[in-house]
Amino acid sequence: MRRGGWLNRLAVVACGLLALSGTAVQAGEGLPDAQTQAWWALTRELSSDAMEGRDTGSPGYDRAAAIVAKRFAAAGLKPVGTDGGWFQPITFEDLRLNEAASRLTIGGQRLRFNREVQLAPSAATPKALAAPATFRGYCSAEEIGDVRGQLVVCHGRPAPARLKGFDRAKALRAAGAAGMLLIAAPGLPGEPIRWPFAYSRSVMPLEDAVKVKAGPPWLQGVLNPNALARLTTRAGDILKAGAAGAELPRVELGEAKAALAVRRRVTRSANVLGLLPGTDPALAGEAIVIAAHLDGYGRGEPVNGDGLYNGTLDDAAYVALLEQFAAMRTGKGLKRPVLFAVFTGEEKGLWGSRWFVRHPTVPLASLAAVINLDQVRPLYPLKLMTVHGLKESTLGALVRQVAEARGIAVQEDPEPERDLLRRSDNWPLMEAGVPGTSFVFATYNESSRARYRDWYERRYHHPADDLSTPVDWQAAADFNRFFTGLTEAAADAPARFVWTAGSKPGER
């Protein structure tokens, strides 16, 4: 469909949406106040089954984007998307493995897609594969050896420090390997690996996809550590040694055989962009960006019979918070402009924010800071908050000031190995020179750690991230008020935010 027609379709949907339901909130810690109930009603609207998980390029996402545009318009924001509309559309190439028509065996053992192995389809994915399979430890330069024509299995995380900066996939392709499976085990202490995965799929803007050269056939994916025992009797020793970063053996795994069917689609999905103009003409070129991602996983591999990945806390709740903040302002500006950026494609590679940086609808030089909201997780009382970007710029000092004034202690990221600063929509803007920050609830006792781990093991990127999540309502209210206070303080700050020495991306 032509761009104009596609934008008009979203606008028509927006005009036809019904008002919010007054349904009672789900159970959680305490009782929510009226403002928190209103926020949760907006969350319910965006993460209901009717939105079908808001997958990038899906009708459910379009419906949710239309809702956001409608709410922004009602709140008095000004559209700043493509051609002066609310939406900034992106055309995507979507490659998805047809699991029912595909098969992969190693040493005669058939692996279940998305439960024991997840593949990353690409233009180089072979329709058929017959190759020896070999385990080569961590797949460091010293361990690879002769792997020409072989499917190579590598131990994943954690990996020894000597591998830092070493691109295993690139090295294996250069060595002529047929593919790489990375054992997704045992993960990192704060982020246990989650199986099943929703699907075996790759999504990227068509603009990028047409530039990709397929090259020789190449199979890439991740392997469930629990499946390793079916491939070798040495699995237990390998996983134990790998968890300790100890030396690993070379093990031959038998023949790998595959028949793979990949479906290709071209889809569209849009960022939603609105502006609250500022009141001080001298600060018109210093907009504060507040961002959240609207996309989720949509429909995928069922867990306990549920195949709909609603994405309530990741990230419908924080798009809802942007909607609520817009409604609270009712068009009344702060000193600086505030850009409301609702991005698509975050779960597929930060594509919405990357696209905005590459094709800005407002000048990038006019953006003074980005405050990003992504699956903040109000699951227990908010006493301590991890702040990504706390010391990278003077924005961090303001975050600390606003948080501590509300009785919230802050800390730098205690798990830098997870690289969370670069894993959400603040990062593309920070790479473009915009000081930025994002947040998660930190843990501080056994109860908070148990709830945090339960989230990662059962809900994160799973169907259970839905309206049944036991939210701590006081914690949710505390964070929402912190965000409101921070945004207002940033927009009214006496000076523009600057990077601290050596912290700007590219200077590190």
Image (tube, rainbow, N blue to C red):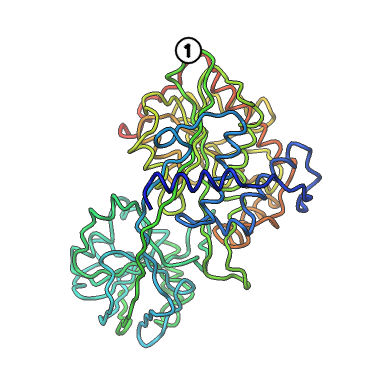
Name the residue beneath numbered marker 1. 281
262 up-or-down from 32: above or below: below
311 up-or-down from 299: above or below: above
Which residue is farthest right? 31
Q: In which quarter of the image is residue 304?
A: bottom right
In the rendered image, the quadrant that contains the C terminus is: top left
Residue at 41% across, 39% down: 427
Which residue is farthest bottom? 108
Q: Is residue 176 left or right of residue 310?
A: left
Q: Which amino acid does label 1 sit on?
A: Pro
User: 264 or 349, which is in the foreground?
Assistant: 264
Q: Is residue 205 left or right of residue 13?
A: left
User: 403 or 27, which is in the foreground?
Assistant: 27
User: 419 or 216, which is in the foreground?
Assistant: 216
Q: Is residue 184 left or right of residue 414?
A: left
Q: Is residue 496 left or right of residue 363?
A: right
Q: Is mark 1 on a helix, strand or loop?
A: helix
Residue at 54% across, 26% down: 276
Q: Quadrant of residue 256?
A: bottom left
Residue 429 lies, in percent from the top left, at 40, 35
Residue at 71% across, 41% down: 475
- Count neighbours of disc 1 (C-alpha within 10 A) and say few if under 14, some if 14 to 19, many if 20 or more: few
